[in-house]
Image (cartoon, rainbow, N blue to C red):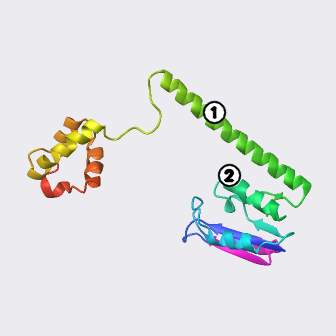
Amino acid sequence: MKIGYARVSTKDQVLDLQIDALEKDGCELIFKETASGAKTDRPELQKLMNHLRKGDIVVVYKLDRLGRSLKHLLDVVAELNQKEVGIRSINDAIDTTTPQGRLFFNISASFAEFERDLIRERTKSGLEAARARGRKGGRRQGMTKDAVQKAILAETYYKEGKMGVNQIAKEIGVSKMTLYKYLRYRKVKIGDYIKIN
């Protein structure tokens, strides 16, 4: 049995193109989902997986409709292989029910995995080279512990209107935006206490 799976990321998008292609391909049943690519919870995909029987073929318009990422796609394919279910992607011309289709899919997945490993290796080498030159990788810290301590002490000045935001940010050594974010975190309403410079 050919079973279709169609997915769009937002409610503004429509499934019509995918559904038309799946029906034209001969799908007897189509599971329809609205879920972002990054979303882990996909109830319709889970229903599809539970519905499948040995010998069925899952048909998608494009492979990226099925998996959130390459890793997720490979996990889904592995689960389908265990169930002895094939995959057919209309737009990617992949059909794992044929030996050539399985070979093409495995080669494509291997290249994608190899590319990911190369990117990971380059990133690791870049971080090591930066560390050797005294630089730290990763996201910069918004406020140091010392700056946070000064900001805590300065809250009374905010409330009493003795210091302006520009002056305090300069004193602490952070941008106004970082200071605003910190104050929001502390639930301090700047406008209630001081004139914003």
Q: Which residue was labeled with disc 2?
A: 71
Q: Residue at x 69, y 40 (%)?
A: 115
Residue 44 at least partly seen: yes
Residue type (three-letter) at the residue carrying disc 1: Glu
Q: Say whether residue 9 is left or right of residue 76.
A: left
Residue placed most toward the observer, 34 or 53: 53
Residue placed most toward the observer, 81 or 1: 81
Res. 19 image quadrant: bottom right
Q: In the rendered structure, find residue 163 and report the number of the disc placed on it.
A: none
Q: Say whether residue 163 is left or right of residue 84.
A: left
Instruction: Tell me the CA gap for discs 2 and 1.
Output: 18 Å
Residue found farthest to the top = 133
Which residues, given as a range, are shown in magenta? 22-33
Packing grade of label 1 (10 A; few <14, some 14-19, many >=20) is few
Q: Is residue 179 above or below residue 42?
A: above
Label 2: which secondary element: helix
Q: Residue 29: where, in percent of width, then height? A: 76, 78
Res. 139 image quadrant: top left
Q: Residue at x 66, y 74 (%)?
A: 32
Label 1: which secondary element: helix
Q: Residue 37: where, in percent of width, then height? A: 60, 60
Q: Which residue was labeled with disc 1?
A: 121
Q: Is residue 139 magenta?
A: no
Res. 26 image quadrant: bottom right
Residue found farthest to the right = 99
Q: Is residue 27 magenta?
A: yes
Packing grade of label 2 (10 A; few <14, some 14-19, many >=20) is few
Q: Is residue 132 above or below residue 122?
A: above
Q: Quadrant of the N terminus?
A: bottom right
Residue 90 at least partly seen: no
Residue type (three-letter) at the residue carrying disc 2: Lys
